[in-house]
Amino acid sequence: QVQLVESGGGLVQPGGSLRLSCAATGTISIINTMGWYRQAPGKQRELVAHITSDGTTTYVDSVKGRFTISRDNAKNTVYLQMNSLKPEDTAVYYCNVEGVAYHLPVDEWGQGTQVTVSS
């Protein structure tokens, strides 16, 4: 069974930085796409960024130039470096991993970590 363990959320002032981490534990033979989503109160969950197995990245327009997604394949871990944070970045952030385990597709979500940007 694959589980995702997130860390790194918290309270930060506008303009500050945070780094989120998400480690996939358990048996997973192939990890394809790793991504970060967020959900603010009263809003739908949206894709923030994702990274494919070959390192191709995609970002939502609102975070381009401020956030950087990266992955460490040896550690089955994905990171989200968030700089120049704005109050509108406040949300619960979820990581997502798609891959294969025991020849079956995997589509797992983390438990979510709160990011609050406020002075």
Image: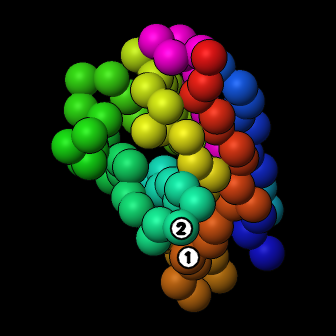
Quarter residue 7 falls in: top right
Residue segment shown in magenta: 13-24
Percent across and percent down for residue 98 are 49, 69
Mark 2 to mark 1 CA distance (whole Å): 25 Å
Dot 2 surroundings within 10 Å: few (below 14), some, or many (20 or more)? few
Percent across and percent down for residue 52 are 33, 52
Three-letter amino acid code of the residue under disc 1 = Asp
Percent across and percent down for residue 47 are 38, 58
Q: Nearer the viewer, residue 28 or 93?
A: 93
Q: Does the rendering let one see residue 106?
A: yes
Dot 1 surroundings within 10 Å: few (below 14), some, or many (20 or more)? some
Outermost residue, front direction? 119
Residue 15 located within the stretch drawn in magenta: yes
Three-letter amino acid code of the residue under disc 2 = Gly
Q: Label 2, on which residue?
A: 42
Return the mark for residue 64.
none
Q: Earlier in the sequence, mark 2 or mark 1?
A: 2
Q: Nearer the viewer, residue 103 or 6?
A: 6
What residue is rendered at 71% in x and 26% in y?
A: 11
Q: Helix, strand, or loop for circle 1?
A: strand
Q: Label 1, on which residue?
A: 107
Check whether the beta carbons of the residues at disc 2 and disc 1 lie within 8 A of each other. Answer: no
